[in-house]
Image (cartoon, rainbow, N blue to C red):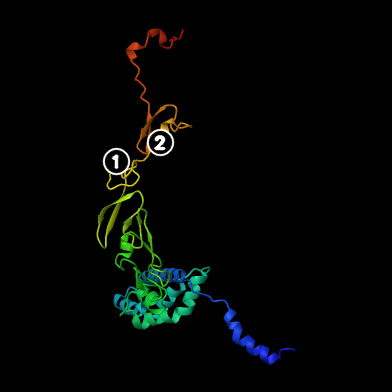
């Protein structure tokens, strides 16, 4: 038995949408593009602020400049210089949101002078304030003022992307970047602040900065006995805790009194 065309069509219309690929926005890239666009807009503002009619009539020039300051002509000049011709992302964002920028220019600029905040964060919603992340701009771990307690980076910080988890700086670990990593000790800590410092090179774990504060001493390797020799032939190798150094050998200064006359170069007088 063959399935009728009408039944096949109905089934296709119901199930095919389920298999269509889902495209997600790269908000990290979008925020970066928006930030760049605003930076170029600010440069355009500065560039066009130096506009000079050069007519010599100060009163007339001031009237013209006053009109030009918020004119469509000035906006057009700024918009034309925002994106490089080969920058697809910038040109695409500008094309999609040119009317939004025009609204800010003619109606919102005075009340909302921060274009990045008004445009990128509040209008087209591709960025978040610093210290926040994700679609709803939630605070990063540790709060928006000190993300990851200033000991790491918050995933998605400043964008509508990320999960807000901390990637801790070297020497710190844990969900909140308050714990000290291997080879580090805690010099100061409370509920919101942690300062970790590196252990002495001779230590495997420690409670302080000196070699006397080791949890366990490291078996020192004498690099000066290794092959190939770490220093040049004219250098002395000095083994230190966890390392080594190369010292230039001192050459005794020659004593001029010890130089015999027979050793001096023979002089030849002209005949």
The x, y position of residue 77, in whole percent, is: 43, 74
The mark total stands at 2
In the rendered image, which quarter contains the N terminus?
bottom right
Q: Nearer the viewer, residue 223 or 73?
A: 223
The x, y position of residue 14, in whole percent, is: 60, 87
In the rendered view, would you say 52 is above or below 13? Answer: above
Q: Nearer the viewer, residue 60 or 172?
A: 172
Residue at horizontal 33 percent and vertical 73 percent from the top: 56
Estimate how packed mark 1 is, as few (under 14), some (14 to 19) or many (20 or more) residues with alpha carbons within 10 Å: some
Q: Is residue 70 left or right of residue 96?
A: left
Residue at horizontal 32 percent and vertical 12 percent from the top: 257
Quadrant in the picture for residue 8: bottom right
The x, y position of residue 70, in whole percent, is: 36, 79
Estimate how packed mark 2 is, as few (under 14), some (14 to 19) or many (20 or more) residues with alpha carbons within 10 Å: some
The x, y position of residue 267, in whole percent, is: 43, 10
Residue at horizontal 61 percent and vertical 83 percent from the top: 16
Q: Is residue 238 visible?
A: yes
Residue at horizontal 29 percent and vertical 78 percent from the top: 59
Q: Is residue 59 left or right of residue 135?
A: left
Residue bearing the label numbered 1: 211
Q: Is residue 52 visible?
A: no
Helix, strand or loop status at disc 2? loop
Q: Could you tell which of marks 1 and 2 lies nearer the N-terminus? A: 1
Quadrant in the picture for residue 7: bottom right
Q: CA distance from mark 1 to mark 2?
A: 16 Å
In the rendered view, would you say 67 is above or below 262? Answer: below
In the rendered view, would you say 262 is above or below 137? Answer: above
Q: Nearer the viewer, residue 78 or 215?
A: 215
Looking at this rendering, what residue extends furthest in the right direction? Answer: 1
Callout 1–callout 2 Cβ contact below 8 Å: no
Residue bearing the label numbered 2: 221
Helix, strand or loop status at disc 1? helix
């Amino acid at each position: 038995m063959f399935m009728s065309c009408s039944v096949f069509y109905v089934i296709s219309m119901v199930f095919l949408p389920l298999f269509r690929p889902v495209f997600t926005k790269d908000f990290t890239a979008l925020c970066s593009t928006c930030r760049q666009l605003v930076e170029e807009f600010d440069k355009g503002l500065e560039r066009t602020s130096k506009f000079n009619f050069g007519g010599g009539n100060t009163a007339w020039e001031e009237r013209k400049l006053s009109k030009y300051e918020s004119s469509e002509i000035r906006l057009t000049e700024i918009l034309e210089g925002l994106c490089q011709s080969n920058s697809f992302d910038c040109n695409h964002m500008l094309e999609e949101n040119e009317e939004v920028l025009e609204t800010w220019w003619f109606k919102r600029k005075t009340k909302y002078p921060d274009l990045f905040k008004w445009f990128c964060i509040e209008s087209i919603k591709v960025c978040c304030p610093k210290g926040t992340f994700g679609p709803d701009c939630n605070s990063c771990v540790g709060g928006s003022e000190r993300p990851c307690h200033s000991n790491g980076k918050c995933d998605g910080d400043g964008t509508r992307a990320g999960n807000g988890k901390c990637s801790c700086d070297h020497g710190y670990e844990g969900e909140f970047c308050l714990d000290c990593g291997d080879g580090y000790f805690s010099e100061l800590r409370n509920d919101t602040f942690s300062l970790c410092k590196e252990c002495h090179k001779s230590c495997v774990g420690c409670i302080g900065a000196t070699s006397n504060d080791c949890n366990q001493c490291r078996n020192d390797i004498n690099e000066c006995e290794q092959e190939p020799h770490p220093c040049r032939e004219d250098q002395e190798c000095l083994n230190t805790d966890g390392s080594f150094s190369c010292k230039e050998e001192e050459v005794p200064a020659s004593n001029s009194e010890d130089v015999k006359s027979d050793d001096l170069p023979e002089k030849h007088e002209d005949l």
